[in-house]
Each structure stands twice: as structure tokens, then as C-alpha cells.
Image (cartoon, helix red, strand yellow):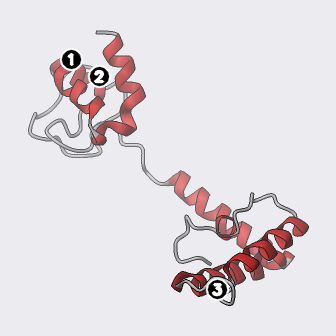
Amino acid sequence: MPADPRNTYYKQLMLAEGADREIISTVYRKLAQRYHPDVDRSREAAARMAEINNAYATLRDPEKRQRYDEWLAGRRDRRRSDSLIVRPGDIAFGGAGKPDGPAIGSVVDFGRYQGWTLNQIRSRDPDYLEWLARSAAGRRYKSEIGLLLERR
């Protein structure tokens, strides 16, 4: 299995997960022609070729591919069940203290409004919400913040 699970064998060979054996073989041959150390003299070529060979060895064999696909599916299922959804009370409150008002929307897990929902922040400090919409920290809340700021 790849060391980095985001760098799947399919990505290494630049293939869709549903690719059939013929496409896998064709793509492998094209990549091998391009990255073979006899053709590409760069330092990365040998490592890239080893990566391509390893991916191809797994994906061309139906049994290995099935086990690999099951492993990928298991990783996706595990990620889906991770507790990425933060609810009020899951985290300690930040410097702003305990929020007031109904707990509606996503919960911020950083900064002075840690533990507050975006709706509660909008009620107390709409300027902070506008700042959050512009900052990198607020990227994951962008659409929700946009809706809240429209309602102002």
C-alpha cells in the first residue's frame, strides 16, 4: 500500500478507479516509456518508475486489485465515521466565554470564539464573522458565513 493513502495507485498511474485491465496496461506502457531511467535521466525518474511498477503490479492482478480496492473503501469508511463534526460542548470555550443564544450551525474550534456556533458569533460580533469569511481559517465555513452575513 502507498505510504501516503491520498496518493493511491490509481493516482500514481493517473487512472480512474473503474479503469479496465486494457486501459491500465496501456497507461502503464505510456508512463514506462516516459519515466524509464534509460529515457528520463532525471533523479526523480528511477523513483517514479518504481512507483509506477509497484502500482501496476497491484492493479493488473485481479486478486491484488480487489484487496487494494477493499483497503481503499475501508479507509474511506473510516474517514467518514471520524468525528469531524464538532457540536457545541464538544470543545472548551475560548476567551469570549460561554455563548448565549441558540446553538445553530457549525461550531468554531479555534480562537476566542472557540465552542461557539457561527450563528452565536453573528449575534455577538458580526465583524469577527466578516473577518473569518476573509481569512484562511474560515475557508471551511465560507458558504455558511455567506448565508449568515446576507441575513444581517
Q: Relative to 74, does residue 82 appear above or below in the rendering?
A: above
Residue 83 or residue 47, whichever sits in front: 47
Q: Which residue is mark 3?
A: 50
Which residue is at a point 24% across and 26% down the rendered structure image? 129
- Residue farthest to the right, as pictured: 22
User: Would you say the residues marked 1 and 2 are in contact, meaning their CB atoms lie under 8 Å apart?
Assistant: yes
User: The residue under label 2 is which amino acid type?
Assistant: Asn
Instruction: Compare marks 3 and 2 and give the one earlier in the sequence.
Output: 3
- Residue farthest to the top, as pictured: 152
- Of tags 3 and 2, which is closer to the observer? 3
Q: Relative to 144, does residue 44 appear above or below in the rendering?
A: below
Q: Which residue is mark 1?
A: 123
Give the image quarter of residue 88: top left
* Number of other residues with Cα within 10 Å of mark 2, as a class: few under 14, some 14 to 19, many 20 or more: many
- How far apart in space, not on screen, are marks 1 and 3 (Cα)? 56 Å
Residue 36 or residue 61, whichever sits in front: 36
User: The residue under label 1 is which amino acid type?
Assistant: Ser
Where is residue 142? Give x, y as percent: 38, 31
- How far apart in space, not on screen, are marks 3 and 2 (Cα)? 51 Å
Q: Which residue is mark 2?
A: 119
* Number of other residues with Cα within 10 Å of mark 1, as a class: few under 14, some 14 to 19, many 20 or more: some
Is 19 situated left or right of 38 in this image?
right
- Of tags 1 and 3, which is closer to the observer? 3
Residue 16 or residue 61, whichever sits in front: 16
User: Would you say the residues marked 1 and 3 are in contact, meaning their CB atoms lie under 8 Å apart?
Assistant: no
Q: Secondary structure at mark 1?
A: helix
Tag of residue 40: none
Residue 70 or residue 35, whichever sits in front: 35
Give the image quarter of residue 98: top left
Which residue is at a point 47% across and 54% down the rendered structure image? 82
Where is residue 13? Give x, y as percent: 70, 69
Is 80 situated left or right of 14 in this image?
left
